[in-house]
Image: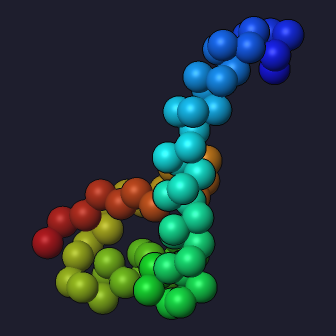
């Protein structure tokens, strides 16, 4: 990484990534305490349907870890 970007650019990338790392750590703690919901895509779609929505389209996005649904009430 240093050879490709150089020292200053690498330090800038690491500094910008600090907040992302911090937030990931916070999410992990919330998941361990059962506050942040871990679910499969099917469980997410079931919850959306149970809330009274008709799912028109669903898929995983952002590295296959985020759920996306297009719904109609």
The quadrant of the picture occupied by the N terminus is top right
Q: Position of residue 49 (x, y in %)?
A: 32, 81
Q: Is residue 50 left or right of residue 67?
A: left
Q: Is residue 36 visible?
A: yes
Q: Position of residue 59 (x, y in %)?
A: 49, 56
Q: Is residue 62 left or right of residue 1?
A: left
Check the image and tell me how it is coloured: rainbow
Q: Residue drawn 66% across and 13% down?
A: 8
Quick one: 61 or 24, which is closer to the camera?
24
Total labels drawn: 0
Q: Residue drawn 32% across and 78% down?
A: 48
Q: Quadrant of residue 28?
A: bottom right
Quick one: 28 or 53, which is closer to the camera?
28
Q: Is 17 situated above or below 59?
A: above
Q: Position of residue 30 (x, y in %)?
A: 50, 79
Q: Residue drawn 59% across and 51% down?
A: 21
Q: Residue drawn 54% across and 56% down?
A: 22
The quadrant of the picture occupied by the C terminus is bottom left
Q: Is residue 60 visible?
A: no
Q: Is 64 situated above or below 38?
A: above
Residue at the left extreme, as displayed = 73
Q: Is residue 4 left or right of residue 29?
A: right
Q: Position of residue 56 (x, y in %)?
A: 31, 61
Quick one: 5 or 57, which is closer to the camera?
5
Q: Is 11 situated above or below 17?
A: above
């Amino acid at each position: 990484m240093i050879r490709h970007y150089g020292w200053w650019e690498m330090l800038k990338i690491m500094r910008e990534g600090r907040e992302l790392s911090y937030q990931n750590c916070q999410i992990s703690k919330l998941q361990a305490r059962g506050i942040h919901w871990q679910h499969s895509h099917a469980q997410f779609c079931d919850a959306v349907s149970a809330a009274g929505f008709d799912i028109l389209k669903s898929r995983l996005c952002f590295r296959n870890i985020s759920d996306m649904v297009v719904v109609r009430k």
